[in-house]
Image (cartoon, rainbow, N blue to C red):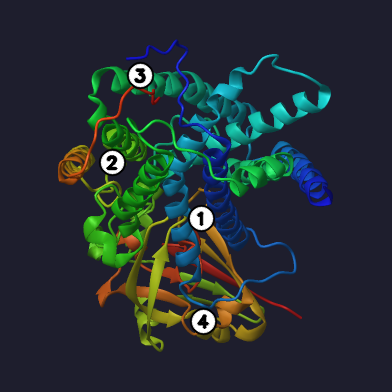
Amino acid sequence: MVRHPEPPVSALRSHRLTSLLGIALGVALGICFLTGLVSHFLQHPPAGITWPSRPAGFYRFTQGLHVITGLASVPLLGAKLWSVYPRLFQWPPIRSVAHAAERVSVAVLVAAALFQVVGGILNVSRWYAPMPFFFTAAHYWVGWLAVGALLVHIGVQLPIVRAALARPEPEPGPDGLTRRGLLGAVATAAGLITVVTAGQTVRPLSGLALLAPRRPDIGPQGLPVNNTAENAGVRTTALDPSYRLTITGPQRQVNLDLTALNALDQHTADLPIACVEGWSASASWSGVRLRDLVTLVGADPDRSTVVVESLEAAGRYRTSTVATPHVRDPLTLVALRLNGETLHPDHGYPARLIAPNRPGVQQTKWLGSITVREES
Amino acid sequence: MRIRAALVVTGVALIGFATAGALTDPDVDPVGVLLFMAGALIGHDVLWMAAVLVTGALITRLVPIRWRAVTTAATIVAAAVTVVAFPLVLGYGRPPGNPSALPLPYGRNLLLILSLIVITAVLSRLLRRRYSPPPGESRIM
Protein backbone atom coordinates (compact mmCIF):
# COMPACT_ATOMS: atom_id res chain seq x y z
CA MET A 1 0.00 0.00 0.00
CA VAL A 2 1.28 3.43 -0.95
CA ARG A 3 1.00 6.22 1.61
CA HIS A 4 0.32 9.58 0.04
CA PRO A 5 1.44 12.73 1.78
CA GLU A 6 -1.12 15.32 2.91
CA PRO A 7 -2.40 18.00 2.18
CA PRO A 8 -5.57 16.44 0.90
CA VAL A 9 -5.88 17.00 -2.82
CA SER A 10 -8.29 14.84 -4.77
CA ALA A 11 -7.09 13.19 -7.95
CA LEU A 12 -10.60 13.79 -9.29
CA ARG A 13 -10.16 17.49 -9.89
CA SER A 14 -9.42 18.44 -13.48
CA HIS A 15 -9.92 21.28 -15.92
CA ARG A 16 -12.35 19.13 -17.85
CA LEU A 17 -14.49 18.38 -14.78
CA THR A 18 -14.51 22.03 -13.74
CA SER A 19 -15.39 23.07 -17.30
CA LEU A 20 -18.35 20.68 -17.50
CA LEU A 21 -19.65 21.77 -14.09
CA GLY A 22 -19.08 25.40 -15.03
CA ILE A 23 -21.05 25.09 -18.26
CA ALA A 24 -23.98 23.45 -16.46
CA LEU A 25 -23.88 26.08 -13.71
CA GLY A 26 -23.62 28.88 -16.28
CA VAL A 27 -26.74 27.60 -18.06
CA ALA A 28 -28.59 27.37 -14.71
CA LEU A 29 -27.52 30.87 -13.74
CA GLY A 30 -28.62 32.15 -17.16
CA ILE A 31 -32.08 30.61 -16.77
CA CYS A 32 -32.39 32.07 -13.27
CA PHE A 33 -31.29 35.49 -14.51
CA LEU A 34 -33.70 35.65 -17.46
CA THR A 35 -36.70 34.34 -15.51
CA GLY A 36 -35.75 36.69 -12.68
CA LEU A 37 -35.78 39.63 -15.11
CA VAL A 38 -39.27 38.60 -16.25
CA SER A 39 -40.45 38.64 -12.63
CA HIS A 40 -38.79 41.98 -11.92
CA PHE A 41 -40.10 43.75 -15.00
CA LEU A 42 -43.63 42.38 -14.56
CA GLN A 43 -43.60 44.07 -11.15
CA HIS A 44 -41.64 47.16 -12.20
CA PRO A 45 -42.44 47.75 -15.88
CA PRO A 46 -40.07 50.23 -17.52
CA ALA A 47 -41.76 53.37 -18.83
CA GLY A 48 -43.51 52.83 -22.14
CA ILE A 49 -43.42 49.03 -22.00
CA THR A 50 -46.51 47.02 -21.19
CA TRP A 51 -46.64 43.26 -20.71
CA PRO A 52 -49.20 41.13 -22.46
CA SER A 53 -51.83 39.44 -20.32
CA ARG A 54 -51.45 36.18 -22.25
CA PRO A 55 -50.44 33.40 -22.11
CA ALA A 56 -52.32 33.37 -18.81
CA GLY A 57 -49.88 30.91 -17.20
CA PHE A 58 -46.68 32.49 -18.51
CA TYR A 59 -45.55 33.93 -15.16
CA ARG A 60 -46.44 30.70 -13.41
CA PHE A 61 -44.08 28.93 -15.82
CA THR A 62 -41.18 31.42 -15.64
CA GLN A 63 -41.24 31.82 -11.87
CA GLY A 64 -41.68 28.10 -11.27
CA LEU A 65 -38.67 27.52 -13.53
CA HIS A 66 -36.72 30.24 -11.68
CA VAL A 67 -37.06 28.53 -8.31
CA ILE A 68 -36.71 24.97 -9.67
CA THR A 69 -33.46 25.93 -11.46
CA GLY A 70 -32.14 27.85 -8.46
CA LEU A 71 -32.68 24.90 -6.12
CA ALA A 72 -31.24 22.42 -8.65
CA SER A 73 -28.10 24.56 -8.92
CA VAL A 74 -27.20 23.85 -5.26
CA PRO A 75 -25.20 20.66 -6.02
CA LEU A 76 -23.79 22.24 -9.21
CA LEU A 77 -22.47 25.24 -7.30
CA GLY A 78 -21.16 23.05 -4.48
CA ALA A 79 -19.29 20.73 -6.86
CA LYS A 80 -17.98 23.59 -8.99
CA LEU A 81 -16.54 25.45 -6.00
CA TRP A 82 -15.09 22.20 -4.61
CA SER A 83 -13.40 21.52 -7.96
CA VAL A 84 -11.50 24.83 -7.87
CA TYR A 85 -11.01 25.11 -4.12
CA PRO A 86 -7.19 24.55 -4.14
CA ARG A 87 -6.86 27.59 -6.41
CA LEU A 88 -7.99 29.75 -3.50
CA PHE A 89 -4.57 29.02 -1.94
CA GLN A 90 -2.42 29.46 -5.07
CA TRP A 91 1.04 30.89 -4.47
CA PRO A 92 2.02 33.64 -5.00
CA PRO A 93 -1.51 34.92 -4.42
CA ILE A 94 -1.04 37.77 -6.86
CA ARG A 95 1.30 37.67 -9.87
CA SER A 96 0.33 40.85 -11.72
CA VAL A 97 -2.27 43.58 -11.90
CA ALA A 98 -4.26 41.55 -14.43
CA HIS A 99 -4.05 38.47 -12.20
CA ALA A 100 -5.25 40.50 -9.20
CA ALA A 101 -8.18 41.85 -11.22
CA GLU A 102 -9.10 38.36 -12.37
CA ARG A 103 -9.01 37.04 -8.79
CA VAL A 104 -11.22 39.92 -7.64
CA SER A 105 -13.73 39.11 -10.39
CA VAL A 106 -13.77 35.46 -9.30
CA ALA A 107 -14.34 36.54 -5.69
CA VAL A 108 -17.27 38.71 -6.85
CA LEU A 109 -18.70 35.79 -8.84
CA VAL A 110 -18.42 33.31 -5.95
CA ALA A 111 -19.84 35.79 -3.42
CA ALA A 112 -22.70 36.78 -5.73
CA ALA A 113 -23.54 33.15 -6.63
CA LEU A 114 -23.58 32.08 -2.96
CA PHE A 115 -25.63 35.16 -2.08
CA GLN A 116 -28.25 34.33 -4.72
CA VAL A 117 -28.52 30.62 -3.98
CA VAL A 118 -28.40 30.81 -0.17
CA GLY A 119 -30.67 33.87 -0.11
CA GLY A 120 -33.07 32.17 -2.50
CA ILE A 121 -33.29 29.05 -0.32
CA LEU A 122 -33.94 31.19 2.77
CA ASN A 123 -36.56 33.22 0.92
CA VAL A 124 -38.60 30.28 -0.36
CA SER A 125 -38.39 28.89 3.20
CA ARG A 126 -39.69 32.29 4.39
CA TRP A 127 -36.79 32.57 6.86
CA TYR A 128 -36.00 36.25 6.52
CA ALA A 129 -34.20 36.84 9.84
CA PRO A 130 -30.66 35.89 8.63
CA MET A 131 -30.96 38.40 5.77
CA PRO A 132 -30.45 41.96 7.05
CA PHE A 133 -31.85 43.55 3.87
CA PHE A 134 -34.98 43.63 1.69
CA PHE A 135 -34.63 40.41 -0.26
CA THR A 136 -36.36 41.29 -3.53
CA ALA A 137 -34.32 44.38 -4.38
CA ALA A 138 -31.01 42.83 -3.26
CA HIS A 139 -31.68 39.60 -5.18
CA TYR A 140 -32.35 41.66 -8.31
CA TRP A 141 -29.17 43.76 -8.19
CA VAL A 142 -26.92 40.89 -7.10
CA GLY A 143 -28.35 38.98 -10.08
CA TRP A 144 -26.85 41.61 -12.39
CA LEU A 145 -23.62 41.44 -10.39
CA ALA A 146 -23.45 37.65 -10.77
CA VAL A 147 -24.08 37.79 -14.52
CA GLY A 148 -21.46 40.52 -14.98
CA ALA A 149 -18.86 38.54 -13.04
CA LEU A 150 -19.85 35.39 -14.95
CA LEU A 151 -19.24 37.07 -18.32
CA VAL A 152 -15.80 38.24 -17.14
CA HIS A 153 -15.07 34.71 -15.92
CA ILE A 154 -16.12 33.14 -19.22
CA GLY A 155 -14.01 35.68 -21.12
CA VAL A 156 -10.94 34.83 -19.03
CA GLN A 157 -11.40 31.05 -18.94
CA LEU A 158 -12.65 30.38 -22.48
CA PRO A 159 -9.34 29.00 -23.89
CA ILE A 160 -8.87 26.71 -20.87
CA VAL A 161 -12.41 25.37 -21.23
CA ARG A 162 -11.99 24.84 -24.97
CA ALA A 163 -8.72 23.01 -24.50
CA ALA A 164 -10.08 20.91 -21.63
CA LEU A 165 -13.12 19.82 -23.61
CA ALA A 166 -11.07 19.06 -26.73
CA ARG A 167 -9.10 16.24 -25.11
CA PRO A 168 -10.46 13.54 -22.84
CA GLU A 169 -8.63 12.93 -19.58
CA PRO A 170 -7.74 9.59 -18.02
CA GLU A 171 -9.85 8.70 -15.01
CA PRO A 172 -8.06 8.57 -11.65
CA GLY A 173 -7.42 5.24 -9.93
CA PRO A 174 -10.27 2.73 -10.04
CA ASP A 175 -10.72 2.47 -6.27
CA GLY A 176 -12.85 5.56 -5.71
CA LEU A 177 -15.40 7.73 -7.42
CA THR A 178 -14.68 8.42 -11.09
CA ARG A 179 -15.25 11.82 -12.71
CA ARG A 180 -18.16 10.32 -14.54
CA GLY A 181 -19.42 9.05 -11.19
CA LEU A 182 -19.03 12.49 -9.62
CA LEU A 183 -20.97 14.15 -12.46
CA GLY A 184 -23.60 11.43 -12.09
CA ALA A 185 -23.90 12.11 -8.36
CA VAL A 186 -24.25 15.86 -8.94
CA ALA A 187 -26.89 15.28 -11.63
CA THR A 188 -28.73 12.83 -9.35
CA ALA A 189 -28.68 15.39 -6.54
CA ALA A 190 -30.08 18.10 -8.83
CA GLY A 191 -32.75 15.72 -10.10
CA LEU A 192 -33.72 14.53 -6.63
CA ILE A 193 -34.01 18.12 -5.33
CA THR A 194 -36.24 18.93 -8.31
CA VAL A 195 -38.46 15.88 -7.79
CA VAL A 196 -39.05 16.59 -4.10
CA THR A 197 -39.71 20.34 -4.51
CA ALA A 198 -41.15 21.00 -7.98
CA GLY A 199 -44.56 19.65 -6.95
CA GLN A 200 -45.28 23.05 -5.42
CA THR A 201 -45.92 24.31 -8.94
CA VAL A 202 -45.93 21.20 -11.20
CA ARG A 203 -49.21 19.64 -10.10
CA PRO A 204 -48.53 16.02 -11.20
CA LEU A 205 -45.45 15.99 -8.93
CA SER A 206 -47.26 17.35 -5.85
CA GLY A 207 -47.47 13.90 -4.26
CA LEU A 208 -43.66 13.64 -4.34
CA ALA A 209 -43.09 17.16 -3.03
CA LEU A 210 -41.67 16.04 0.33
CA LEU A 211 -39.54 19.18 0.68
CA ALA A 212 -41.76 21.74 -1.03
CA PRO A 213 -42.43 24.87 1.02
CA ARG A 214 -46.01 24.75 -0.30
CA ARG A 215 -48.52 22.23 -1.50
CA PRO A 216 -50.92 23.59 -4.13
CA ASP A 217 -53.89 21.97 -2.36
CA ILE A 218 -53.14 22.96 1.25
CA GLY A 219 -54.76 26.16 2.51
CA PRO A 220 -58.14 27.72 3.14
CA GLN A 221 -60.59 26.52 0.46
CA GLY A 222 -57.84 24.20 -0.82
CA LEU A 223 -55.51 26.99 -1.93
CA PRO A 224 -52.31 28.30 -0.27
CA VAL A 225 -52.15 31.79 1.19
CA ASN A 226 -49.17 34.10 1.49
CA ASN A 227 -50.53 36.91 3.64
CA THR A 228 -53.44 36.26 6.00
CA ALA A 229 -56.18 38.77 6.81
CA GLU A 230 -55.02 38.72 10.43
CA ASN A 231 -51.42 39.49 9.48
CA ALA A 232 -52.48 42.24 7.07
CA GLY A 233 -54.56 43.83 9.83
CA VAL A 234 -57.73 43.90 7.72
CA ARG A 235 -59.92 41.38 9.55
CA THR A 236 -62.26 43.98 11.04
CA THR A 237 -62.57 46.25 8.01
CA ALA A 238 -62.93 43.35 5.57
CA LEU A 239 -65.78 41.78 7.57
CA ASP A 240 -67.53 45.14 8.24
CA PRO A 241 -71.11 44.94 6.83
CA SER A 242 -70.89 48.59 5.73
CA TYR A 243 -68.16 47.61 3.22
CA ARG A 244 -68.23 49.51 -0.06
CA LEU A 245 -65.92 49.17 -3.07
CA THR A 246 -65.20 52.67 -4.34
CA ILE A 247 -64.60 52.95 -8.08
CA THR A 248 -63.40 56.31 -9.33
CA GLY A 249 -63.33 57.10 -13.04
CA PRO A 250 -62.74 60.17 -15.14
CA GLN A 251 -66.50 60.86 -15.28
CA ARG A 252 -67.97 59.57 -12.05
CA GLN A 253 -67.48 57.64 -8.85
CA VAL A 254 -69.59 54.73 -7.65
CA ASN A 255 -69.69 52.96 -4.31
CA LEU A 256 -70.80 49.34 -4.54
CA ASP A 257 -71.69 47.10 -1.62
CA LEU A 258 -71.53 43.31 -1.95
CA THR A 259 -75.17 43.09 -3.01
CA ALA A 260 -74.55 45.58 -5.82
CA LEU A 261 -71.36 43.77 -6.89
CA ASN A 262 -73.21 40.45 -6.96
CA ALA A 263 -75.99 42.03 -9.03
CA LEU A 264 -73.57 42.88 -11.86
CA ASP A 265 -72.77 40.38 -14.63
CA GLN A 266 -70.85 37.49 -13.05
CA HIS A 267 -68.06 35.66 -14.87
CA THR A 268 -65.76 32.75 -14.04
CA ALA A 269 -62.05 32.41 -14.84
CA ASP A 270 -59.71 29.51 -14.15
CA LEU A 271 -56.47 31.22 -13.21
CA PRO A 272 -53.41 30.37 -11.13
CA ILE A 273 -52.07 32.21 -8.15
CA ALA A 274 -48.36 32.21 -9.07
CA CYS A 275 -46.19 33.36 -6.20
CA VAL A 276 -42.76 34.94 -6.56
CA GLU A 277 -41.61 32.21 -4.15
CA GLY A 278 -42.12 29.68 -6.94
CA TRP A 279 -45.32 27.92 -5.89
CA SER A 280 -48.51 28.13 -7.87
CA ALA A 281 -52.02 26.80 -7.68
CA SER A 282 -54.96 27.00 -10.04
CA ALA A 283 -58.46 27.85 -8.95
CA SER A 284 -61.80 28.80 -10.37
CA TRP A 285 -62.56 32.43 -9.58
CA SER A 286 -65.83 34.20 -10.18
CA GLY A 287 -66.97 37.77 -9.88
CA VAL A 288 -67.19 40.92 -11.95
CA ARG A 289 -64.96 41.67 -14.94
CA LEU A 290 -62.66 44.58 -14.23
CA ARG A 291 -63.41 45.96 -17.71
CA ASP A 292 -67.14 46.09 -16.84
CA LEU A 293 -66.36 48.17 -13.72
CA VAL A 294 -64.19 50.48 -15.83
CA THR A 295 -67.08 50.94 -18.27
CA LEU A 296 -69.41 51.59 -15.32
CA VAL A 297 -67.49 54.74 -14.38
CA GLY A 298 -67.44 56.04 -17.96
CA ALA A 299 -64.00 54.95 -19.14
CA ASP A 300 -62.91 52.86 -22.11
CA PRO A 301 -61.27 49.63 -20.86
CA ASP A 302 -59.21 49.43 -24.07
CA ARG A 303 -57.49 52.69 -23.17
CA SER A 304 -57.39 52.59 -19.37
CA THR A 305 -55.01 51.74 -16.61
CA VAL A 306 -56.29 50.95 -13.15
CA VAL A 307 -54.83 51.34 -9.68
CA VAL A 308 -56.32 48.98 -7.11
CA GLU A 309 -55.94 49.62 -3.38
CA SER A 310 -56.34 47.19 -0.55
CA LEU A 311 -58.06 47.87 2.77
CA GLU A 312 -54.61 47.42 4.34
CA ALA A 313 -53.41 50.55 6.12
CA ALA A 314 -49.80 49.99 5.10
CA GLY A 315 -47.55 47.47 3.43
CA ARG A 316 -45.41 47.25 0.35
CA TYR A 317 -48.07 45.43 -1.64
CA ARG A 318 -51.23 47.31 -0.57
CA THR A 319 -51.69 48.77 -4.05
CA SER A 320 -50.94 47.60 -7.56
CA THR A 321 -51.30 48.97 -11.05
CA VAL A 322 -53.21 47.07 -13.71
CA ALA A 323 -51.92 47.95 -17.18
CA THR A 324 -54.22 48.24 -20.19
CA PRO A 325 -53.67 44.70 -21.58
CA HIS A 326 -54.85 43.26 -18.26
CA VAL A 327 -57.71 45.79 -17.85
CA ARG A 328 -58.94 44.88 -21.31
CA ASP A 329 -58.61 41.10 -20.76
CA PRO A 330 -61.98 39.45 -20.03
CA LEU A 331 -60.21 37.01 -17.66
CA THR A 332 -59.31 39.85 -15.27
CA LEU A 333 -61.86 39.79 -12.48
CA VAL A 334 -62.74 41.48 -9.24
CA ALA A 335 -63.33 38.06 -7.71
CA LEU A 336 -66.02 37.51 -5.08
CA ARG A 337 -65.94 33.72 -5.03
CA LEU A 338 -63.34 30.95 -5.11
CA ASN A 339 -64.34 27.52 -6.43
CA GLY A 340 -67.98 28.55 -6.03
CA GLU A 341 -67.73 29.65 -2.38
CA THR A 342 -67.57 33.16 -0.96
CA LEU A 343 -63.89 34.15 -0.63
CA HIS A 344 -62.22 33.13 2.62
CA PRO A 345 -60.92 36.23 4.48
CA ASP A 346 -57.36 35.02 3.82
CA HIS A 347 -58.10 34.91 0.09
CA GLY A 348 -59.22 38.54 0.05
CA TYR A 349 -62.87 38.71 1.19
CA PRO A 350 -64.91 40.71 0.28
CA ALA A 351 -63.27 41.23 -3.13
CA ARG A 352 -59.89 40.66 -4.71
CA LEU A 353 -58.17 41.16 -8.02
CA ILE A 354 -57.32 38.11 -10.11
CA ALA A 355 -55.69 38.53 -13.52
CA PRO A 356 -53.81 36.31 -15.98
CA ASN A 357 -49.98 36.36 -16.29
CA ARG A 358 -49.37 38.33 -13.11
CA PRO A 359 -47.33 37.66 -9.94
CA GLY A 360 -49.33 36.73 -6.84
CA VAL A 361 -48.20 39.82 -4.90
CA GLN A 362 -49.99 41.94 -7.50
CA GLN A 363 -53.26 40.01 -7.23
CA THR A 364 -54.35 42.55 -4.62
CA LYS A 365 -56.65 41.23 -1.89
CA TRP A 366 -59.28 43.00 0.28
CA LEU A 367 -60.00 45.60 -2.42
CA GLY A 368 -61.14 48.94 -1.01
CA SER A 369 -60.89 51.20 -4.02
CA ILE A 370 -60.29 51.14 -7.74
CA THR A 371 -59.10 54.22 -9.60
CA VAL A 372 -59.39 54.31 -13.39
CA ARG A 373 -57.11 56.49 -15.49
CA GLU A 374 -57.94 56.89 -19.14
CA GLU A 375 -55.09 57.48 -21.55
CA SER A 376 -55.71 60.30 -23.98
CA MET B 1 -9.73 37.07 -28.74
CA ARG B 2 -12.32 39.61 -29.78
CA ILE B 3 -15.10 37.52 -28.22
CA ARG B 4 -13.16 37.24 -24.97
CA ALA B 5 -12.51 40.97 -24.84
CA ALA B 6 -16.19 41.68 -25.52
CA LEU B 7 -17.22 39.29 -22.73
CA VAL B 8 -14.84 40.89 -20.23
CA VAL B 9 -15.83 44.46 -21.17
CA THR B 10 -19.56 43.65 -21.03
CA GLY B 11 -19.08 41.83 -17.73
CA VAL B 12 -17.22 44.75 -16.15
CA ALA B 13 -19.92 47.12 -17.40
CA LEU B 14 -22.64 44.94 -15.83
CA ILE B 15 -20.72 44.78 -12.53
CA GLY B 16 -20.61 48.59 -12.62
CA PHE B 17 -24.33 48.76 -13.48
CA ALA B 18 -25.18 46.38 -10.62
CA THR B 19 -23.07 48.31 -8.12
CA ALA B 20 -24.48 51.68 -9.14
CA GLY B 21 -28.02 50.29 -9.17
CA ALA B 22 -27.68 48.74 -5.74
CA LEU B 23 -26.19 51.91 -4.26
CA THR B 24 -28.93 54.15 -5.66
CA ASP B 25 -31.90 51.85 -4.94
CA PRO B 26 -33.51 53.07 -1.70
CA ASP B 27 -34.77 49.51 -1.07
CA VAL B 28 -31.22 48.10 -0.93
CA ASP B 29 -29.23 48.28 2.27
CA PRO B 30 -25.63 47.87 0.99
CA VAL B 31 -24.24 47.15 4.46
CA GLY B 32 -26.73 44.33 5.00
CA VAL B 33 -26.02 42.90 1.55
CA LEU B 34 -22.23 43.00 2.08
CA LEU B 35 -22.57 41.42 5.52
CA PHE B 36 -24.64 38.54 4.13
CA MET B 37 -22.24 38.12 1.21
CA ALA B 38 -19.26 37.96 3.54
CA GLY B 39 -21.13 35.52 5.77
CA ALA B 40 -22.01 33.27 2.82
CA LEU B 41 -18.42 33.40 1.53
CA ILE B 42 -16.82 32.59 4.90
CA GLY B 43 -19.53 30.05 5.68
CA HIS B 44 -18.79 28.23 2.43
CA ASP B 45 -15.04 28.66 1.99
CA VAL B 46 -14.10 28.02 5.60
CA LEU B 47 -16.78 26.07 7.47
CA TRP B 48 -18.50 24.14 4.68
CA MET B 49 -15.32 23.27 2.77
CA ALA B 50 -13.62 22.16 6.00
CA ALA B 51 -16.55 19.83 6.64
CA VAL B 52 -16.42 18.54 3.04
CA LEU B 53 -12.68 17.85 3.17
CA VAL B 54 -12.92 16.13 6.56
CA THR B 55 -15.82 14.01 5.31
CA GLY B 56 -13.85 13.08 2.19
CA ALA B 57 -10.81 12.15 4.27
CA LEU B 58 -12.95 10.03 6.59
CA ILE B 59 -14.51 8.19 3.65
CA THR B 60 -11.02 7.48 2.25
CA ARG B 61 -9.73 6.25 5.62
CA LEU B 62 -12.73 4.38 6.97
CA VAL B 63 -14.67 3.00 4.04
CA PRO B 64 -13.46 -0.19 2.33
CA ILE B 65 -12.24 0.40 -1.20
CA ARG B 66 -15.09 -1.37 -2.95
CA TRP B 67 -17.68 0.75 -1.09
CA ARG B 68 -15.82 4.04 -1.46
CA ALA B 69 -17.23 5.33 -4.75
CA VAL B 70 -20.85 4.67 -3.89
CA THR B 71 -20.40 6.15 -0.40
CA THR B 72 -18.91 9.33 -1.85
CA ALA B 73 -21.70 9.62 -4.41
CA ALA B 74 -24.41 9.04 -1.80
CA THR B 75 -22.80 11.60 0.52
CA ILE B 76 -22.83 14.22 -2.26
CA VAL B 77 -26.51 13.64 -2.97
CA ALA B 78 -27.43 13.60 0.72
CA ALA B 79 -25.48 16.80 1.43
CA ALA B 80 -27.15 18.69 -1.43
CA VAL B 81 -30.65 17.63 -0.40
CA THR B 82 -29.91 18.52 3.23
CA VAL B 83 -28.76 22.04 2.29
CA VAL B 84 -32.09 22.68 0.54
CA ALA B 85 -34.12 21.09 3.34
CA PHE B 86 -32.29 22.65 6.29
CA PRO B 87 -34.29 25.90 6.66
CA LEU B 88 -37.54 23.96 6.20
CA VAL B 89 -36.58 21.44 8.88
CA LEU B 90 -35.69 24.27 11.29
CA GLY B 91 -39.05 25.84 10.42
CA TYR B 92 -38.25 29.37 11.57
CA GLY B 93 -40.08 30.66 8.49
CA ARG B 94 -43.39 29.08 9.49
CA PRO B 95 -45.68 32.04 10.16
CA PRO B 96 -48.18 31.80 13.01
CA GLY B 97 -51.77 31.69 11.77
CA ASN B 98 -50.92 30.55 8.25
CA PRO B 99 -51.00 26.75 8.13
CA SER B 100 -50.60 26.77 4.32
CA ALA B 101 -46.98 27.96 4.53
CA LEU B 102 -44.46 25.21 5.27
CA PRO B 103 -47.26 22.71 5.89
CA LEU B 104 -45.26 19.46 5.84
CA PRO B 105 -43.28 17.45 8.45
CA TYR B 106 -39.95 18.36 6.87
CA GLY B 107 -37.71 16.64 9.44
CA ARG B 108 -39.46 13.32 8.91
CA ASN B 109 -39.48 13.81 5.13
CA LEU B 110 -35.76 14.60 5.04
CA LEU B 111 -35.01 11.45 7.06
CA LEU B 112 -37.15 9.47 4.63
CA ILE B 113 -35.23 10.85 1.63
CA LEU B 114 -31.83 10.27 3.30
CA SER B 115 -32.86 6.67 4.06
CA LEU B 116 -33.87 6.18 0.43
CA ILE B 117 -30.47 7.50 -0.68
CA VAL B 118 -28.68 5.03 1.62
CA ILE B 119 -30.85 2.10 0.53
CA THR B 120 -30.37 2.95 -3.16
CA ALA B 121 -26.61 3.27 -2.67
CA VAL B 122 -26.33 -0.08 -0.88
CA LEU B 123 -28.51 -1.86 -3.43
CA SER B 124 -26.65 -0.36 -6.37
CA ARG B 125 -23.35 -1.62 -4.93
CA LEU B 126 -24.63 -5.07 -4.05
CA LEU B 127 -26.29 -5.55 -7.43
CA ARG B 128 -23.11 -4.73 -9.33
CA ARG B 129 -21.65 -8.19 -9.86
CA ARG B 130 -18.31 -7.94 -11.55
CA TYR B 131 -15.62 -6.38 -9.42
CA SER B 132 -11.92 -6.92 -9.19
CA PRO B 133 -10.13 -5.14 -6.35
CA PRO B 134 -7.34 -3.01 -7.80
CA PRO B 135 -3.89 -2.68 -6.29
CA GLY B 136 -2.85 0.54 -4.61
CA GLU B 137 -4.95 3.37 -3.32
CA SER B 138 -5.92 6.81 -4.46
CA ARG B 139 -7.55 9.51 -2.45
CA ILE B 140 -10.96 11.02 -2.95
CA MET B 141 -11.79 14.18 -1.12
- Residue B28: x percent and y percent? 63, 38
Observer-side mark, 2 or 3, equals 3
Q: Label 4 to label 1, Cα distance in Å?
A: 20 Å
A268 lies left or right of A218? right
Q: Quadrant of residue A338?
A: bottom left
Mark number displayed over residue A318: 1
Q: CA distance from mark 2 to mark 3?
A: 43 Å
- Cα distance, mark 1 to mark 2? 21 Å
Residue A277 in sight here: no
Please report the residue visible at 29 percent of the width from the left and 29 percent of the height from the top: B134
Reading the image, the residue beneath label 4 is A293
Give how far across and how far down residue B48 sits, in percent: 43, 24
Chain letter for the residue marked with disc 4 in the picture = A
Residue with the mark numbered 2: B96
Q: Secondary structure at mark 2?
A: loop
User: Split into 4 quadrants, where in the image is the N terminus of chain A?
Assistant: top left
Circle 2 chain: B
Residue position for label 3: B57
Q: Which circle, 4 or 2, is nearer the viewer?
A: 2
Same-chain status of marks 1 and 2: no
Q: CA distance from mark 3 to mark 4?
A: 69 Å
